[in-house]
Amino acid sequence: MLEPTPSILEITGVQKVYQASNGPVEALRGVNLTVRKGEFVCLLGASGCGKSTLLRIVAGFEQATTGGVTMYGFPVDKPGPERGMVFQDYGLFPWLTVRDNIGFGPKHRRVAASEVCKITDRFMAMVGLTAFADRYPHQLSGGMKQRVAIARVLSNDTDVLLMDEPFGALDALTRSKLQEELVEIWRSTGLTVIFVTHSVEEAVLLADRVIVMSAGPGRIDCEIDVGLPRPRDVASSDFNALRRQITQKLTSHLGGGRSGATADS
Amino acid sequence: MSLAGAMDGTPDAILITPAAETPPAPVARPRRPVLQRLRQIALALIVPVGLLVIWDVAVRWTGTRLVPSPAGVALMMWDFAFGGIYDDAYSASLPIHFWKSVQRVYGGFFCAAALGIPLGLMIGRMPLLRSLLDPTLSLLRPIPVTAWLPLSMIFFGLGPRAAIFLVFLGAFFPILLNTIFGVKSVDVRLFEAAEMLGCSGAQQFRSVVLPAALPSIFNGLRLGASFAWILIVVGEMTGVPEGLGAVIMDGRTLSRTDLVITGMIIIGVTGYLSDRILLLLSNYFLRWSPQHHA
């Protein structure tokens, strides 16, 4: 990651203002960020710092009030298959089986049925769900659902994987298993990942670069390159030194006693 | 619901070693399904059998000649179905009356579904169409279907088409309103998911809106079908010679109460069976949804 790689996403001067009942609320101000191809970027911050809003603007679900996002130089104005989103609450289609959820994207892009079948087989195998091909989402555990959600985006040939606290609803063991699998998938596919989290540990474990955000209005506070070799050891002293450093940056902006509870987990 | 509970209860810890992942355990079945089933049937029969007994005793006790005894009705039913007892105009005429009514009920019902579902999908999804049609539909909805009787006879003349129209009106609103409700309550997340996967615009009707609203649509269809059976009697007041509703009206005119009750029972049983068929269809199409297995 040290050699210069071309940028895939440019976020330029993004400001987002919501009209609330008691007047306008500024959720984001002056956000600039360049994401390089193949990079794993974590947006880290406490609740209310606008990290999810920023991700939703990149996804095209929301529009920036001023400024904007370009991908490969083209402005982003609506959702598209090249920016696949993984939601915290999965967003699977409950009436489709695992296989059909994963094949949803290719099928709607009019890929031939036999080809869709091959693609789904491949990505079901990648996330280890081949044995569950004919299950419906309500018959799966949370970890399995999130694997389907990841496979569904991968099978659609996405360039950028957008993840909005994807493992936030999972228990600790499942979460660490999925983190490991995600890194493996990212390394083998060369995807670009933008990953929103409020966990410092998760950010340091996964990211090439951690973007620390702060609230009121949401903005980028600082960027930290995580130079630690992979696979990363959460118990190593380097890991913990970095984690402590980032936690301090986060809490210094929160002020008061509520910092510890929201900043790290 | 028990299914969802059992599945969600599967500890995620099992995911540590994917090779050891086992399918969530199948739903625990009642230990003796046959006994359980018999018990259900027995419980369901207590009230109807009790009512029959009370009816019989009351007729004997009062000595009334206005209401026939259950045995009298049973005799009438036999004659209505197979003939050979009274040998009058109604003997062995059940098939023709039944067939005519079924045609009208399902004719009206299918028209209501064919119009109500697509219209509901569009009203639920298109704010412009909603603003355009919602006020008018809200005004029409509270008008009792019986009030349409004179107008429907003027529009469609004396005959089956007026009956079908009334059945249609009765079934239309429950189907339409439930479809609209179903569309409005689709999780926004599913639209976002579809969109980011490249499914947008009109494609979403078939791939997201319709399947997501299907549970509500089936509720509407079941309600609509029961209204259709309710309204067949009114519908066949429009001067049609044949049909279960027409038989009931004839029975009233001729003071043949046994004929009236026979018609009532046949409509009740047929309506029940038609609901069971819809329920079977609903369970099949909603097999993905643990909440909708009734």
Image (tube, coloured by chain):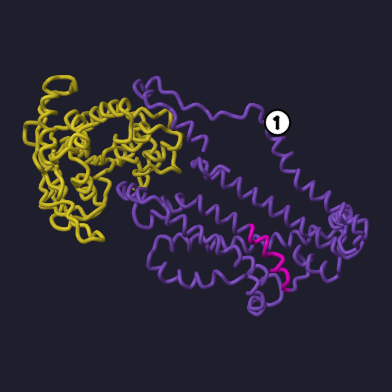
Q: Where residue A42 appears, x then y in whole percent?
A: 18, 37
Which amino acid type corresponds to the residue marked 1 in the rendered image?
Leu
As rendered, which of A138 and A97 lies closer to the eye? Answer: A138
- Choose top left, top right, bottom left or bottom right for residue A93: top left
The residue most toward the left is: A3
- Image point (24%, 45%), residue name: A82
The colour applied to the residues of chain A in this rendering is yellow
As rendered, which of A119 and A84 lies closer to the eye? Answer: A84
Whether residue B82 can be seen here: no
Position of residue B36 in the picture relative to residue A83 (left or right): right
- Choose top left, top right, bottom left or bottom right for residue A168: top left
Quarter placement of the N terminus of chain A: top left
Position of residue A134 in the picture relative to residue A60 (left or right): right
Q: Is residue A195 above or below residue A53?
A: above
Which residue is denoted by mark 1 in the rendering? B35
- Image point (83%, 51%), residue name: B54
Q: Where residue B39 appears, x then y in whole percent?
A: 71, 35
Residue A64 forms part of the magenta stretch:
no
Packing grade of label 1 (10 A; few <14, some 14-19, many >=20) is few
- The chain painted purple is B
Part of the protein shown in magenta: B226-238
Residue B234 forms part of the magenta stretch:
yes
Q: Is residue B128 above or below residue B79?
A: below
Q: Where residue B195 appears, x then y in whole percent?
A: 32, 50
As rendered, which of B73 and A63 lies closer to the eye? Answer: B73
Per the picture, the main secondary structure of the magenta-coloured stretch is helix
